[in-house]
Image: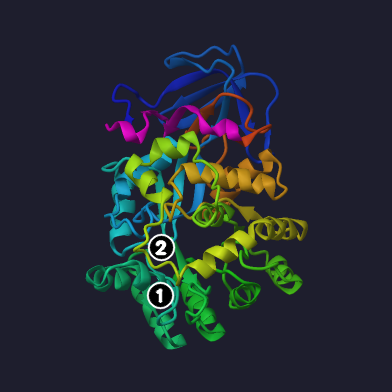
């Protein structure tokens, strides 16, 4: 992925069908969209007179706002734990752009590395989607993700990764102190882990959850909680968190948990697809990878994912993976229950992750949201307008195609409101009004 060096950020895109993100529908008829200096300057029926702007023939394609992924880990890798590889954050950023994802929220990463990456992207030193970041995940001593990292990483990496990826707090006072220290790095949100992974791992107490959320609010940022079960949801929402990262994925969500989320108007970043992707390792006939997954993932990674070597001890993680297979339809029912209760469901992929490819995975997530009962238009609204408002409030300057907004744009053939799979083959991606030169990442620069 590269910027078009000859582009100026000013052009007229002729004859496109425009997605109305606030309404989750396509506008009728063809439109011309004028972009000046990276912002949308005009939208009118096709044929408008424009001067001083290069013209691009949209040929009746669908124009959407760039997609927003509210759950990523830029320092992670799609490969399996039996294939140890160094992370490539810049390659991950390019993969997101290739798939039309122009804004991401990193919900757990090495600190301060992720904040340096966020600023490098903002300055234009590194090509990537706009980055919002939480920094480390807060957990109880030995809780998730610490327990999982101890299983997945060799001893000579644990000492470096764990203290930079996670903050372990045992008491409310420790929580307040650690959040105060992190605030100096200006995180966009605070991420806490309430789930148990593996099942025997310890878990944050309600008192510490409440202290973390309150401390985040005192410092001026919101708190997002990783949950897995209904009890996690109830404790997190009662503790004052502002959003949930993950649907309840291990059981049918209790009525009490649904009522708690709805009463506090807490949005949920569902991430159905990350659990689906991990099912494949125990399935006899796993679904094939999509073209767009293969286009952003190195062939050697896909090869490693296809076979679990006999030397890999999968006993610690197999119960979790089995539970994901059993819960396949339950996750979809849980999304439907939340939506019936009026809860806002947001779009996030939790990628890169074990078998889950950056950028392409958000396309899978949108399919899964449709399977859970959303219309394609509603799923696209979740991945654009709603997610932008979550990150930047009602005045967000991205997430919709309207006057004055950033020209983060995705042009695709077909009708994504009829079938979200139309997103899989973008014709063009624009970042801040600049067209990007796209090619499969497996082809090199």
Mark 1 or 2: the one toward you: 1
Front residue of 380 and 223: 380
Q: Position of residue 390 (x, y in %)?
A: 56, 54
Calculate the distance from the C-alpha at mark 1 to the C-alpha at mark 2: 15 Å
Q: Left or right of 388: which side holds 157? A: left
Classify 391 as above or below 423.
below
Q: Nearer the viewer, residue 359 or 102?
A: 359
Measuring 29% from the left and 63% from the top, which residue is drawn there? Answer: 112
Which of pointers 1 and 2 lies earlier in the amino acid sequence? 2
Mark 1, residue position? 147
Query: What residue is disc 2 on?
Result: 108
Q: Quadrant of residue 190?
A: bottom left
- Is residue 373 shown in magenta? no
According to the image, what is the colour scheme of the structure? rainbow
Which picture quadrant has residue 441?
top left
* Marks 1 & 2, CB-CB < 8 Å contact: no
Does any portion of residue 385 appear in the rendered image?
no
Number of other residues with Cα within 10 Å of mark 1, as a class: few under 14, some 14 to 19, many 20 or more: some
| Residue range highlighted in magenta | 421-445
Relative to 8, is 418 on the left or the right? right
Q: Name above or below for residue 200 compared with residue 76.
A: below
């Amino acid at each position: 992925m590269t910027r078009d060096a000859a582009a100026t950020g000013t052009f007229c895109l002729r004859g496109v069908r425009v997605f109305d993100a606030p309404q989750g529908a396509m506008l009728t008829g063809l439109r011309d969209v004028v972009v000046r200096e990276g912002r949308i300057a005009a939208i009118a029926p096709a044929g408008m007179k424009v001067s001083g702007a290069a013209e691009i023939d949209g040929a009746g394609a669908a124009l959407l706002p760039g997609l927003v992924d509210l759950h990523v880990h830029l320092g992670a890798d799609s490969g399996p734990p039996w294939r140890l590889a160094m992370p490539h954050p810049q390659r991950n950023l390019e993969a997101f752009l290739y798939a039309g994802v122009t804004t991401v929220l990193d919900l757990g990463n090495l600190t301060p590395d992720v904040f340096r990456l966020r600023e490098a992207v903002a300055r234009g030193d590194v090509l990537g989607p706009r980055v919002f970041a939480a920094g480390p995940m807060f957990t109880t001593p030995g809780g998730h993700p610490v327990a999982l990292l101890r299983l997945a990483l060799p001893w000579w990496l644990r000492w470096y990764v764990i203290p930079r990826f996670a903050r372990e707090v045992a008491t409310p006072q420790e929580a307040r102190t650690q959040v105060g220290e992190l605030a100096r790095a200006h995180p966009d949100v605070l991420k806490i882990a309430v789930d148990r992974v593996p099942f025997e791992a310890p878990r944050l107490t309600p008192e510490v959850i409440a202290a973390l959320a309150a401390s985040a609010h005192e410092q001026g940022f919101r708190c997002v909680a990783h949950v897995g079960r209904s009890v996690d949801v109830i404790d997190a929402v009662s503790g004052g968190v502002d959003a949930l990262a993950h649907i309840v994925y291990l059981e049918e969500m209790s009525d009490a948990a649904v009522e708690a989320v709805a009463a506090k108007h807490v949005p949920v970043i569902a991430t159905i697809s990350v659990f689906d992707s991990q099912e494949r390792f125990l399935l006899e006939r796993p679904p094939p990878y999509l073209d767009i997954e293969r286009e952003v993932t190195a062939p050697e990674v896909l090869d490693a994912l296809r076979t679990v070597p006999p030397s890999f001890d999968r006993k610690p993680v197999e119960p979790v993976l089995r539970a994901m297979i059993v819960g396949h339809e339950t996750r979809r029912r849980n999304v439907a229950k939340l939506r019936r209760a009026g809860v806002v469901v947001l779009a996030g992929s939790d990628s890169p992750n074990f078998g889950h490819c950056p950028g392409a995975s958000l396309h899978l997530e949108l399919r899964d949201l449709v399977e859970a009962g959303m219309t394609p238009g509603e799923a696209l609204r979740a991945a654009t307008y709603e997610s932008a408002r979550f990150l930047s409030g009602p005045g967000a300057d991205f997430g919709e195609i309207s006057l004055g907004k950033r020209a983060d744009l995705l042009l695709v053939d077909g009708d994504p409101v009829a079938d979200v799979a139309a997103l899989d083959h973008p014709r063009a991606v624009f970042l801040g009004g600049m067209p990007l030169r796209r090619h499969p990442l497996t082809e090199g620069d």
